[in-house]
Amino acid sequence: MSEKRRHESIYSHHAVSNHDLRRIAVTAECDPRSVVKYLRGVELAPMLRGRIERALASTGFDHLVIKRTASSPPAALDKARSNGAPVVAAASGVAKR
């Protein structure tokens, strides 16, 4: 496998060309490797994840935005938990500290 071919195979994901990948990275003000990590589902810092999601939406790739699940709560909930605020448990409806 040639060097060029190897480079293409690393960055070609989810029907995003190398050009589009770089365009998304420039819009998100991040490294193209961070966009690749996002598309692979790797956990990123919330601010970076948000910038990449906005960049995907603004460049026409909003279908690639990864939907957040209940297993990854939003940052505001994490902050509330760390401050000792009561959080309602989803299954029982009982407030916990």
Image: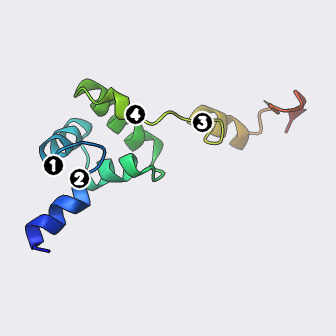
Work out whether mark 4 precedes mark 1 in sequence or the reverse, and give the earlier one. 1
**Which secondary structure, mark 1?**
helix
Q: Which residue is mark 1?
A: 18
Q: Is residue 6 left or right of residue 40?
A: left
Tell me what residue is drawn at x 41 percent, y 41 percent.
49
Which amino acid, by three-letter code, is at mark 4? Val
For residue 12, the mark is: 2
For residue 69, the mark is: 3
Q: Residues within 10 Å of mark 3 (few under 14, many from 20)?
A: few
Q: Is residue 13 left or right of residue 45?
A: left
Which amino acid, by three-letter code, is at mark 1? Asn
Q: Is residue 47 visible?
A: yes
Work out whether mark 3 precedes mark 2 in sequence or the reverse, and give the earlier one. 2
Q: Which residue is mark 4?
A: 65
Which amino acid, by three-letter code, is at mark 2? Ser
Alpha-carbon distance for marks 3 and 4? Answer: 12 Å
Q: Position of residue 35 (x, y in %)?
A: 30, 47
**Which secondary structure, mark 3?**
loop
Looking at the rendered image, the quarter that the C terminus falls into is top right
